[in-house]
Amino acid sequence: MIAPIKKGPLNVLGKPLEPCCKKLKTGWYRNGSCETDAGDHGKHVVCTVMTDKFLAFSKMVGNDLSTPMPQYQFPGLKEGDCWCLCAARWQEAFEADMAPQVKLESSEQSALEIIDLENLKTFAAKAE
């Protein structure tokens, strides 16, 4: 009997999910990918490229992503860093006109339960 082929997570474009970041340990699994599972209640599935504008917004709404926290092995983020963001936080930033750019190929498909694909496409980061 042939074992079924295990399909990995898909991105918002319906293709295999690509890594978000090689430099930082981001994502629910802290492996650089915006993969998720049922335990990830925040849905850390949107691969974003940080901006100073978004970092200020995030801090203002109670999630300071720019201050290093060595006790959690968190270096603090700066403009240009990539990070797996919670889908609801991205949507909140979008509604406040503060959303960061998105790497569509690296954003996990479940983001579409919260965010409209056309809105994500509007903020698509240019390919590196």
Image: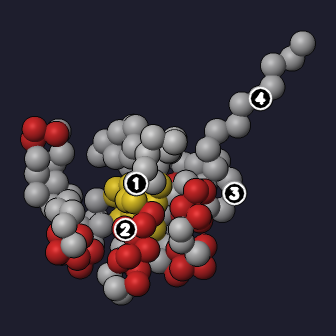
Residue 42: x and y, percent? 40, 54
Circle nearer the N terminus (3, 2): 3
Q: Name which residue type carries label 4.
A: Ile
Left or right, 42 with respect to 37, comes to: left
Is the N terminus in the top left, top right, bottom left or bottom right quadrant? Answer: top right
Residue occupied by mark 3: 14
Residue under numbered circle 4:
5
Residue 25 lies left or right of residue 127; in this view the side is left
Q: Earlier in the sequence, mark 1 or mark 4?
A: 4
Q: CA distance from mark 2 to mark 4?
A: 34 Å
Q: Determine the CA span between mark 3 and mark 1.
A: 21 Å
Quarter placement of the C terminus: bottom left
Q: Secondary structure at mark 1?
A: loop
Question: Tag 3, which secondary structure?
Answer: loop
Q: Residues within 10 Å of mark 2 (few under 14, many from 20)?
A: some
Residue labelled with disc 2: 89
Q: Position of residue 20 (x, y in %)?
A: 44, 51
Q: Which mark is residue 74?
A: none
Q: Quadrant of residue 116?
A: bottom right
Q: CA distance from mark 1 to mark 4?
A: 29 Å
- Residue corresponding to mark 1: 42
Q: Is residue 113 above or below residue 15?
A: below
Looking at the image, is mark 3 or mark 1 earlier in the sequence?
3
Closer to viewer: mark 2 or mark 4: 2
Question: Where in the figure is residue 45, as x and y percent of width and height?
Answer: 47, 55
| Mark 1 neighbour density, 10 Å: few (under 14) some (14–19) many (20 or more) | some
Cβ atoms at labels 2 and 1 below 8 Å apart: yes
